[in-house]
Every structure is written in C-alpha cells, then in structure tokens.
Amino acid sequence: MTVILLVIVAVALVLIVAPLAYTRLRRPRGPELEPPAPPPAGAPGARARPPRARPPARRPPTRPPSAPPGPRPPGAPPGPPGAPPAPIDLDTEAEALLEEVEAEEEAQRLAPPVRPRFRDRLTKARALFAGFLSRTTIDQDTWDELEEALIRADVGVRLTGEVLDDLRGRVKAQGITTSGELVDGLKADLKAALASADRSLRLDPGETNVWLFVGVNGVGKTTTIGKVGYREAAAGHRVVMAAGDTFRAAAAEQLALWSTRVGADLVRGAEGGDPGAVIFDAVQRAASRGADLVLGDTAGRLHTKVNLMEELKKVRRVAERPPGHLTEVLLVIDATTGQNGLTQAKQFAEAVEVTGVVLTKLDGTAKGGIALAIQTELGIPIKLVGLGETADDLTEFDPDEFVEALLAV
Ligand code: GDP
C-alpha cells in the first residue's frame, strides 16, 4: 500500500514539475545572462562606430501572476500550447530602439564645412598686384605700379598714402634694395592695418542668441544666413531662421531651402508683413524649443530712405527683448561694390550699432582691398568672408592669410 502511495506521489510530482521546467527553458535570455553577439563587420546591421556603453543590467520585469497575458513580441516563437507567453525583454527592446534613433541622428548630422583657402579664391584680387610683384628693382615705376594697384584694389586713398609713405621711409632707413624686401615691408604694413580686432562671433550658452543680418539688397544676406546656419548646425547648435525680409518673397523661399538643408526651423511671415513680428515669433519659437541661435534676415531695399533704417531699429529692439539675447548685428557688404560698400556701411552702422562685417563675393572681385578700407576707415571688424556661393564657401577673416594670398607670387 505504501509503495502504491509513493508511486502516486512521484507521478504527481513529475506532472507538476516538468511543465514548469519546460517553460523556464523556453524563456528568452536576458542581457545579464548572455549578451547577444554583435553582428560580424560588414554584415547588415553591423555598425562602424564603437559600441555604446551598455546600461547596467537589470532583470526583466516579471508580470504579476494575476496580470492578463500581453501580446507576443513580433518575431517571438509561440510557446507550447497552454504555456504562458514569453515575457517581453524591455531592456533589449529599448536599447535596440535607442541605437536605431542614434544611428538615424548620426546619419542626419551635417558634415562640418570644408574651409575654402583665400589663396585659391583671391585670383582676381591678386592679379592687380602682378605688375608690381614682377618687378625686380625698386625705381619710380615700382612705386607707380604699387600705388595704382592699391588704388584699383579699393584700399582707399588715405591708407594707400600712409602705406607708401611708410614703405619709402623703411627703404631709406633700412637700406632696402631688393623688391623681395619691399614686398615683405608691404605685407607687414597691411597686416598691421588689419591687426588687433576681435573677430569672434558671440554665442552665449543657455541663451536664445540672436544674430541679425543687415545690408542692402543683393549683397548676399540670405545666402550668408544659409552658410552660417549650416556652419553652426554642424557645430551642434540648434538654429532657427527668421525670414525677416518680408518685402522680397524670393528671400523667404531661398531661406526655406536653406533651412530644410540645414535642418533648422524656419519662421516666415506674410508678404509685406511686419519684419519685427517675424523676429518676435522666431525668438519665441527658439525659446520654446530650446534652440540657442536665431538667424534673422532683414530687408535691404531703400537703404537711403529713413523708413528702412527706422524699420531696422525696430527689428533690433524686438530682437533685444527677452528671451531674445541679441549678440551680433552683422552688416553684409558685397566686395564687388568696392568703395560704395563703405558708404552703405556708414549708414547701417549709425542706425543699428553693427558688431561686425561679413564681406561677401571676395572670390569674384579685384577690389579685395575694400577689406582694408572697411576696417581702417570704419573701425568695424570683418568677422566672416564669403568666398563663393555654396554652403562651404564661408570662412573667418584671417588677416595674415588674406594679405599673403593677395600678394602671393
Ligand atoms: P540678399 O538680397 O542680400 O539676401 O542677397 P542673396 O543672398 O540673395 O545673394 C545675392 C546673390 O549673390 C546670389 O546669387 C548669391 O548666390 C550670390 N552670393 C552671395 N554670397 C556670395 C559669395 O560669397 N560669392 C559669390 N560669388 N556669390 C555670392
């Protein structure tokens, strides 16, 4: 009898324990038990970048016994009939999702712009000095060639006179006899004229920085905003572009293209609408989305009319109002306009307290000397230079590189 009872108990135990053991074996393993092997290099899904640090392993949450069974995760094998469904491994799922999002972000990240070289782009400006640079002796013709080149390059009469006087003095005092030494003296004078300026662009962390771009129509404001947006977005800033030139529909269209390309937000208003309202909306949008830089386009028509300057003053006041944090007012000047650019610069500087100049189209002009006139006559630092029409064609103004490129043999 006892033997029969023991057999019955043993059979009952086998019947209870076996399904439980089977269920445990079918359960997918958590990452803390055995991390999944990475796919081999080159295989689909393999990543070129180093693996992300894994979060500390946690046990998959266990469902309370009373909870109703959830849906089966996609791809999971069905359990044996009657067995409870395999639990979802939330850690692995979340991590896979996170990696996917990161990979997507990485693919979308902009490549940093490739900096153009002054030497490659200043061919027209350099051509003016070819006659002077080809001379081997220092005689009256040498001085005449140099004076003509400086004037034609739009360096300005005042600076040209000062440079020639200084060089004549050096030649006498130092006994300079070779043209090479004369060119060295000229380079030193031009570099000195451009020295000691703060060319940094101010962007305060944690603020809704606003950079306004002002200047007459056609100088390259909108294009420059596109290039600057590209540059700053590639550097990791969140950018909002404000189509404040509401008088020119094409400007808003152009900015829309740039914003898409750069991945920046765009705020635009109705055609002919209030530019101040556009800047206001852009600042609000940036503040609410945690963007740290608003690039504001402005109208450039009628720069001789008082109303345009009044409009710009108003836009400036709006940009300054918190949460707006106006840190740059950049005057865009087209280098091909030469000395005309100076007249414009004076008018804008009076109206809106310009913090720096962006000198565009230096690639297509012989009048590169205007860079010297702007700084020496207006005292406004040139901060950026446009050397072409593409997103890459913008660079900081490096006076030494500029002078060396202008006078390269
Ligand atoms: P805005 O009216 O001041 O906004 O001027 P746009 O941005 O519309 O530019 C006017 C023209 O100048 C466009 O054809 C631009 O492609 C061109 N442009 C702008 N910057 C440069 C530059 O640095 N170099 C050259 N070659 N062209 C430029």
Image: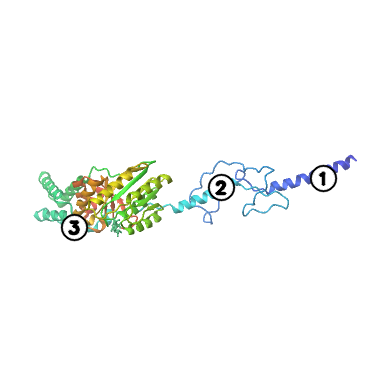
Q: Amino acid at mark 2?
A: Ala
Residue occupying the point 42% across, 45% down: 288
> Residue 165: x and y, percent?
11, 47
Q: Amino acid at mark 1?
A: Val
Q: Secondary structure at mark 2?
A: helix
Query: Which residue of the protein is positioned furthest toward the right in this rendering?
Result: 1
Q: Secondary structure at mark 3?
A: loop
Q: CA distance from mark 2 to mark 3?
A: 64 Å
**Mark 1 highlights which residue?**
11
Around disc 2, counting alpha carbons within 10 Å, would you say few (fewer than 14), some (14 to 19), or many (20 or more)? few
In the image, 283 versus 378, the foreground residue is 283
**Mark 2 highlights which residue?**
94
> Residue 408: x and y, percent?
22, 54
> Residue 307: x and y, percent?
25, 51
Any atom of ligand 1 within 8 Å of the CB at mark 1? no
Looking at the rendering, in which quadrant would you find the C terminus? bottom left
Q: Amino acid at mark 3?
A: Leu
Sequence-first disc among 1 and 3: 1
In the image, 204 versus 153, the foreground residue is 204
Q: Left or right? Give the position of 401 relative to 67.
A: left
In the image, 231 versus 24, the foreground residue is 231
Sequence-first disc among 2 and 1: 1
Assign ligand 1 to one image quadrant: bottom left
Q: CA distance from mark 2 to mark 1?
A: 43 Å
Q: Secondary structure at mark 1?
A: helix
**Mark 3 highlights which residue?**
128
In this view of the protein, can residue 188 be seen by the observer? no
